[in-house]
Image: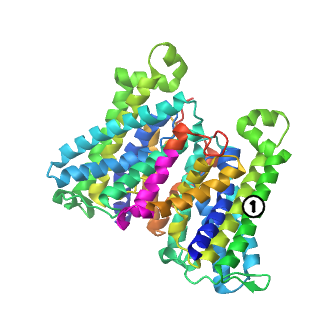
Amino acid sequence: MLLLQLLVNGIVTGCALGVVAISFSLVYSTTRIFHVAHAGVYTLGGYLAWSCAMRGIPDPLALVLAMLACAVLGALIQTQLYARLERRGATHLVVLIASLGALAVIQNIIAAVYTPDILQFPSPWAARILSLGGLRLTYAQLVTLVISLCGFAVVMLFARYTLLGKRIRAVASNPFLAEITRLEPRRVYVYVIAIASAVVCLPGVLVPFDLGLQPYGGITPLLTATIAMIAGGVGSIAGAFLLSVVIVVLQNLSLLVMPGQWSIGITFFIFVIFMLFRPRGLFAAA
Amino acid sequence: MDFLYSYLILAEIYVLLGLSTNLLVGIVGIFSVSQAAVFGVGAYIVADFLLSGTLPFLPALAIAAVCCILLNVLITLPSLRVAGDYFVVTSFGIQLLATAAFTNWTEGTGGANGLPGIPPPTVAGITLTDTTQYLAMTSIAAVIGCLCFALIMRAPFGRLLRAIREDELAVAAAGKGVLRAKVEAAALAGAFGGIAGGLSATFMSFIDPSSFDLDASILLLTMIVVGGARTLAGSVIGPFLLLALPQALSLVAIPTTVAAASRQLLYGLLLIAFALFRPQGLLGEKL
């Protein structure tokens, strides 16, 4: 039964992480920027929603407001930071350093404004427990599972069928050709980061309903998500989502044999295995 | 006076770390946020040997240096195999893994409580209890480190490293061993990191995981970005400036609850500002 419970917990958290992974994958496969500051956006989303919830705004509305704010933040990071760096001919290393700087700024503003302690959402519904047979799921977990799966489906459909989605994929596959066919890659980059920042708010707000908020809590999920993205193959949205679920389920199952503080070790071990045997990932585009 | 001496000692220890980070990030061009992990491993090894009394200071420092060389080569190896960005993941991963190990492996590291009461080092029969004596030792270490760095920069090996950063393919085509040069640079960076760790552990006489976490790695990176990449002057001025900053901040009335956060916030702002407006740092070459 414990095994089944861990498996279900793993699937729930894995789906949430999968949304982080697909949002990061969107940014990375299009702009080729290793957007470390995404971890900050993820954390900030949760805090903004918490502020709204504390002011009595209903939770669904708080989620939407946080998504809007983060989309604006993402667009600002692209236009004010990455685009400027690109115009100045900055090397990849410098962009990475700037992104790390942005992450430090976002995290520490959060820590200074909200204190570094763990915060809990004031929503009584989230902790209510649903028992299925011997399985126990909180409502927060249930909502996370459903919304994460919906988020995944929407992103898939968006990338495949909408005009903007096609434009993003075109820019991702060949920025030069996109430039000469007037798809305006630079403008697309702004859209992509804004969309990804809004999408990452889904897990950024929903996971803390269950586990609480911490200003420095974004790095481990982002690292796990990037590992899932690489293992799934850069550019494959479904691969990133699937591998996230697999990695988190393995992490949860590892709790049977070792204490939870070492789960980052499991994640990293998976990464090393992939690096050694399949560095291009499982579902890499040709 | 003691206050000034402590600042100088710490700054000199961080000069060694700055040299180590500059070798990797500045010269070879490998993004690294795991140098604090190497620093920590060096510190914990020396602390463990001294606390158990099994080895005197210098042999312990030597063992720490060797372990850190091995560790840093191991960390850096993936960057030789996989291109660019995957190494960012490795680097973050190693740092988080190291923090997990420092916090949770209680037998070796004392866990979150750290290791108190590390005895002062004995060098050539003298036990260094006084800060002036200690300052002499760290000065010697820092000068040796700077000398090594300056000599390497002038030597053919230094030119080879710079050439690798400019164009790896061209260097390989010219028949030079790219892999070997990178491994050697990583080894040197590891040695500097390990020795700095040992010095810091004995000087502070107390170590805990918070000195070797991701924030510490970001601080090291900020030192290099602010000081300047690839020059000796840059690696020296960065640590001295950034360690003076918290003192300057303490003059401004900031509540203690947000002091740590505002310090890190400042490092982040510095990283962004220098990346945007002065990628060569104060006294360096363009990153």
Q: Is residue B192 left or right of residue A176?
A: right
From the top left corner, tell me how far across and down residue B264 is, in percent: 46, 56
Question: In the rendered image, is residue A233 in sight?
Answer: no
As for residue A113 lying within the magenta part, the answer is: no
Instruction: Tell me what residue is drawn at x 76 percent, y 77 percent.
Output: B59
| Region rendered in magenta | B250-272
From the top left corner, tell me how far across and down residue B284 is, in percent: 66, 44
The image shows residue B101, relative to residue B229, as above or below, that is: below
Comparing B25 with A140, the one in front is: B25
| Quarter of the image with the N terminus of chain A in it | bottom left
Instruction: Tell me what residue is drawn at x 33 percent, y 64 percent.
Output: A117
From the top left corner, tell me how far across and down residue A272 is, in percent: 60, 52
Comparing A42 with A223, the one in front is: A42
Instruction: Tell me what residue is drawn at x 76 percent, y 54 percent.
Output: B149
Question: Residue reaching furthest top?
Answer: A181
The quarter holding residue A131 reads bottom left
Question: In the rendered image, is residue A77 in sight?
Answer: yes
Chain of residue at mark 1: B
The image shows residue B68, relative to residue A147, as above or below, that is: below
Instruction: Tell me what residue is drawn at x 19 percent, y 49 percent.
Output: A59
From the top left corner, tell me how far across and down residue B97 is, in percent: 54, 61
Task: Name the element at disc 1.
Answer: helix
Q: Is residue B68 left or right of residue B253?
A: right
| Quarter of the image with the C terminus of chain A in it | top right
Q: Which residue is mark 1?
A: B145
Main secondary-structure element of the magenta-colored stretch: helix
Comparing A2 with B23, the one in front is: B23
The quarter holding residue B188 reads bottom right
Q: Amino acid at mark 1?
A: Gly
The local crowd at label 1, few if under 14, some if 14 to 19, many if 20 or more residues have their Cα within 10 Å, is many
Comparing A63 with A261, the one in front is: A63
